[in-house]
Amino acid sequence: MTQPSVAFEQDSGTARIIVAGELLTQSLSTVEDAFRAIKPETRPVVVDMSQIEAMDTGGAWMIADLANRFSAAGATVTFEGLAPAHSSLLDTVSENLPKSVPAEAPHKGLIPWLEDLGRGTVGAGRDTVSILGFLGLTLHRLARTLVMPWRLRRAALVSQMEETGFKALPIVALMGFLIGVVLAFQGATQLKQFGAEIFVVELISISVLRELGILLTAIIVAGRSGSAFTASIGSMKVQEEIDAMRTLGLDPIEVLVIPRVVALLIMLPILGFVADMAGLFGGALMSWIDLDVSPGMFITRLKENTSVWHLAVGLIKAPFFALVIGVIACWQAMQVRGSAQSVGQRTTASVVQSIFMVIAIDALFSIFFSEIGV
């Protein structure tokens, strides 16, 4: 087998490229760097192919690519000594080379901006209708499960409770503890200026029980469990497992969505309660260290000045947060369209939308409880 070679010669008027040997795919690596080293010029170029003994599609691609680079620089390219069979192959490869299309410059002005705004508005409207429909479908399946509890997949429910609840206990407890420590430390710093250090108990208890405990727990669950829901179901969508379920007569909502949503409905209030207790413990410990408020005094003031409604207000929000996180995560998974990149995009969107909706619902609950005097 004759190894391929390429030589570049130039004189005052033209440049000459001499290609020789067997230009076959298995041996192209020996001349790849030599072809790449030839820099395009603007003067006429002659490609001498009279010494080529054999050529396949890979060799024709290298010559066609070289000719394209010179043509793009403004040079005129001609071929010499080209055998008829090689000429036909080179023409076929040249016609099928991918054409580089320059990126279209973004449109500017009022009309394109209005078009983009309208397109985004229509897309947001469609997504809203779609997620409301998915919410209705999920609530219908939940209601049917309550009426016919034997339809609930208990093994899947227990597995999801373990993943979303028990495995999240350490991070939720640590988060609650640190929030209590931070509130006690920052509250003490401010209250010392007025000699009202003892009121740090009310600051910690009301803040943690009413707002921060359950809110931050829901945010952690949205980032941890919501993203896992979207990624797992989205991967099944990519691999067409959900279509296979429908073919077998199984309802994906009942099989995949309901166990996850029910697991969140059960475990999020428990996680919120754990975060509340850890926050109170962290606040009591920091108050004891920094303010000399003994644990006994902390518990006494907690009983006397903190209503049980503060705890109830926080836990009442938990099922709503759980439903929103579960529905958004599973709906985003169902929107995955056939690629791993789509799974990543939908997982990100799931976390962002879940956290936004959790904060928005918390704000609505705060206004509602304020208006009714709770």
Image (cartoon, helix red, strand yellow):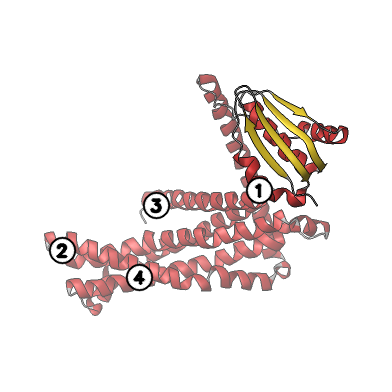
Q: Which residue is mark 4?
A: 177
Q: SS class of the residue under badge 3?
A: helix
- At label 3, the amino acid type is Ser
Let me know if residue 316 appears in the view. no
Circle 4: residue type: Phe
| Structural distance between the alpha carbons of marks 1 and 2 | 54 Å
Where disc 2 sits, the SS reads loop
Name the disc covering residue 335, or none: 1
x and y percent of residue 85 in the render?
A: 87, 35
The relative height of residue 106 versus residue 258 in the rendered view (above or below) is above
Depicted 159 relative to depicted 27: above or below: below
Q: Marks 1/3: CA distance? A: 32 Å
The front one of 59 and 198 is 59
Residue for point 41% across, 68% down: 275
Q: Are marks 2 and 3 in contact (CB under 8 Å)?
A: no
User: On residue 366, which mark appears?
Assistant: 3
